[in-house]
Image (spheres, helix red, strand yellow):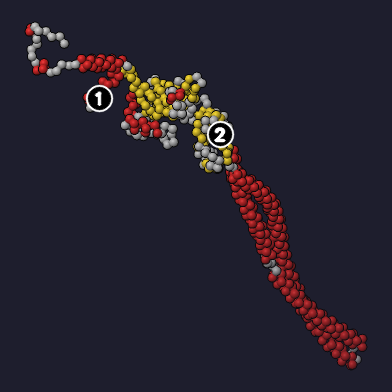
Amino acid sequence: MISNSNSQFLPPVQENDFLPPISRWTILGGLVMVSVLGVAVLLASVTKYRVTVKAQAVVRPAGELRIVQAATEGQVMNISVKENQSVKKGDRIATIDDSRLQTKKNQLKNNIQQSQLQIAQIDAQILALNNQIAAETDRNQRAVASAEAELSRRQRDYQDRKITSKAEVEEAQANLKQAQAELQRAQVQLKSTQADLRSTDFALKAAQSKRNRYQRVANSGAISKNQLEEAQLNVDQQKQAVEMQKAAVLAQQQAIEQQKQAVEAARAKWQRAQTALNPSQAEVAIAQQGIAQEKAKGSATLATLEKERQALIQQQIEIKKQRERDDRELQQLELDLNQSTITATADGTISKLNLRNPGQTVRSGEEIAQIVPSDVPLVIKAAVPPQDKSKLKPGQKVQMRVSACAYTDYGTLKGVVSEISEDTIKPQANSATATAPATASSQQGGAVGTFYEVKIKPDVLFIGKGKNQCPIQVGMEGRADIISKEETVLQFLLRKAKLLAEF
């Protein structure tokens, strides 16, 4: 300190003038602090500071994964691949026990063979029934034709009997009339003969009277003996004539009796003919009933045979339906047997294998493995909390620390933001990024359970340099630092101070 005794240079006396003087070291320390502060402010205004958005990320294929599913239910016999193993389309991944399917297949084959045998037997039975139906139809037609012929014959006999009986009646009636006419003629002849007898008897009496007169006269000798003999001869002749007439009357009476008997016989024959004039139609009715019986018998037999035939046809239809069902089931079993070998659906790498050991039971449709196609590029999918969405835009640089590749040995994987989802996404169960949004959101104070998916295109698919490289594979996880912008430390401090002041 410089002192000056000149009073004109003395300042006015103040109370602070009585304070002890500042030491040299204090002044030097103050200068150092001011210098350091200036340098710090200068560095803070020049040094760049990266504002990053931290997010959990996982390596995924750019397209969809190829899912391999079990096409049938069963127990795993063997596993042919491991995770991260390269496969080609059609390569065997695992084999499912098909013994149950083979047993069922054999049973179905036996059932189909039995069905075919039954169908063949039923075909033979149907053919036999068809032949039997044809034979029965022919026999019935012949029987009906025979019965109809018998009916025709009986109808003809009936008509013939009717005509004959009518003719016989007419004949008997004619004979009766003829007999009656002959009887009448005989009676007339009898009367004529009786009249002749009486006439002859009168002539006899006249001859006897004449003879008696001639005899008395002859006794007197008035007439000759010849005249008496002539009178006696005349009497004898008249007696003979009377006897002849009596015989004729007797014969005529006998003839009349015969004619009466003939009339009675003709009447009896006429009455018999009258009785047979209307012959019975019983035989015709019997023949008609025979036709109806043959038709009914044939219809009943044919109906029985047709019923058996329809039953066989229905049974055959049921057996054919069962065989068709067995055929379809056998085809399905063949497909299931072909699908008992689980194969790769695409060329690529097994990213996930859900089979742990042989003997594991799988269900139909259950996911067996996930394959990353070999022709699909890899991307990094990061889960960013909703409150950091405004800090992101495509083209921002990214640095990712991969958990499987030690940061101290390989460094970070560099990339660029290629796409940001438009809407928030809810995490899915068993998703590789399912825990990322929850972690990031909880760290940032956002809503747990939703996130924005950010796709990052890596510059290369390995980390490291030279021979010390770690290849990037599907499923690797890590932390992605997305560089949203760069600012100086001074700007950062001022921004924080502004936020505190506003608070």
**Residue 11 to residue 495: above or below:** above
Residue 186 in the image: x percent, y percent? 77, 76
Q: Nearer the viewer, residue 380 or 428?
A: 380
Q: Which residue does the image show at 43% across and 21% down from the upper left?
A: 414
Q: Residues within 10 Å of mark 1 (few under 14, many from 20)?
A: few
**In 3D space, how far apart are the residues under numbered discs 2 and 1 (Cα atoms)?**
57 Å
Mark 2 lies on a secondary structure that is loop
Disc 1: which residue: 499
**Residue 48 to residue 363: above or below:** above
Q: Residues within 10 Å of mark 2 (few under 14, many from 20)?
A: some
Numbered label attached to residue 81? 2
Report the side of 449 relative to 246 (left or right). Answer: left
| Residue 170 visible from this viewpoint | no
Residue 160 in the image: x percent, y percent? 72, 62
Q: Nearer the viewer, residue 389 or 473?
A: 473
| Residue 309 visible from this viewpoint | yes
Residue 214 in the image: x percent, y percent? 87, 89
Q: Nearer the viewer, residue 184 or 151?
A: 151
Mark 1 lies on a secondary structure that is helix
Residue type marked 1:
Leu
Q: Which residue does the image show at 84% across and 81% down from the upper left?
A: 244
Q: Which residue does the image show at 30% across and 16% down from the upper left?
A: 43
Quadrant in the picture for the C terminus: top left
Q: Residue furthest bottom?
A: 220
Q: Quadrant of residue 202?
A: bottom right
Quadrant in the picture for the N terminus: top left
Q: Earlier in the sequence, mark 2 or mark 1?
A: 2
Residue type marked 2:
Val
Q: Which residue does the image show at 89% across and 90% down from the upper left?
A: 218
Residue 234 in the image: x percent, y percent? 87, 84
